[in-house]
Image (tube, rainbow, N blue to C red):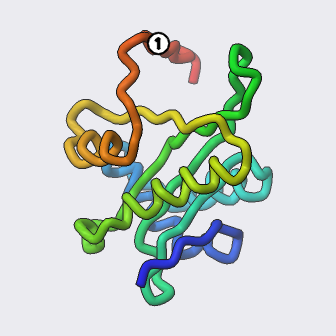
């Protein structure tokens, strides 16, 4: 049975390999040390909320949410920035369970909604998100400026 919990520092050693694999999935170089520091900083600074999916005590997936604020709605939103399930656990509705947990958390904690973006080529995510009630935003353009000195 899959259990979903909120990550703490004690989960770092199990979470880091998944977080690193997630980054590699998005064509970033593997960097376990950097991944560990990044996740540790988010947990210590209470800058994100990380839900872990575990099977028999082994972490097999995670979702990471970042807080955002909407001035026009005068409300807290969450950005679902990361959702990842280890390849050997895919097809077992773990991604769906993590999304449902995030939605339940939002309802219980006064979060107006959850925003996310994914690549057009992510066929699994692009199939899952609409089934979970996420609607594609066709009313807005999203832009990104990249700092050339970064």
Q: In this view, does 14 lie to the left or right of 78?
A: left
Q: Which residue is drawn at 37% across and 66% down?
A: 94
Q: Where is residue 21 in the image (x, y as percent from the top left)?
A: 38, 59
- Quadrant of the rendered structure where residue 70 is? top right
Q: Where is residue 87 in the image (x, y as percent from the top left)?
A: 26, 66
- The quadrant of the rendering that contains the C terminus is top right
- Quadrant of the rendered structure where residue 66 is? top right
Q: Which residue is drawn at 35% across and 51% down?
A: 24
Q: In this view, does 70 lie to the left or right of 113?
A: right
- The quadrant of the rendering that contains the N terminus is bottom left
Identify the residue under disc 1: 143
Q: Which residue is drawn at 64% across and 35% down?
A: 112
Above or below, 113 against 7 in this view is above
Residue 27 in view, yes or no:
no
Above or below, 88 against 141 in this view is below
Q: Where is residue 89 in the image (x, y as percent from the top left)?
A: 29, 72
Q: Which of 29 and 84 is in front in this view?
A: 84
Above or below, 87 against 143 in this view is below
- Quadrant of the rendered structure where residue 35 is? bottom right
Q: Which of 107 and 66 is in front in this view?
A: 107
Residue 141 in view, yes or no:
yes
Q: Position of residue 140 (x, y in %)?
A: 44, 11
- The residue positioned farthest toward the right in the image shown: 45
Q: In this view, does 149 lie to the left or right of 23?
A: right
């Amino acid at each position: 049975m899959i259990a979903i919990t909120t990550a703490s520092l004690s989960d770092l050693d199990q979470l880091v390999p998944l977080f690193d694999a997630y980054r590699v999935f998005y064509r970033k170089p593997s960097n376990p040390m950097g991944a560990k520091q990044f996740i540790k900083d988010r947990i210590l600074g209470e800058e994100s909320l990380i839900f872990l999916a575990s099977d028999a005590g082994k972490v097999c997936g995670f979702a990471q949410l970042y807080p955002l604020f909407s001035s026009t709605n005068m409300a807290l939103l969450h950005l679902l920035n990361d959702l990842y399930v280890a390849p050997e656990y895919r097809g077992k509705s773990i991604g769906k369970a993590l999304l449902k947990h995030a939605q339940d958390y939002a309802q219980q904690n006064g979060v107006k909604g959850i925003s996310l973006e994914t690549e057009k080529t992510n066929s699994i995510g692009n199939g899952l998100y609409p089934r979970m009630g996420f609607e594609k935003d066709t009313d807005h353009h999203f832009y990104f400026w990249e700092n050339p000195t970064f």
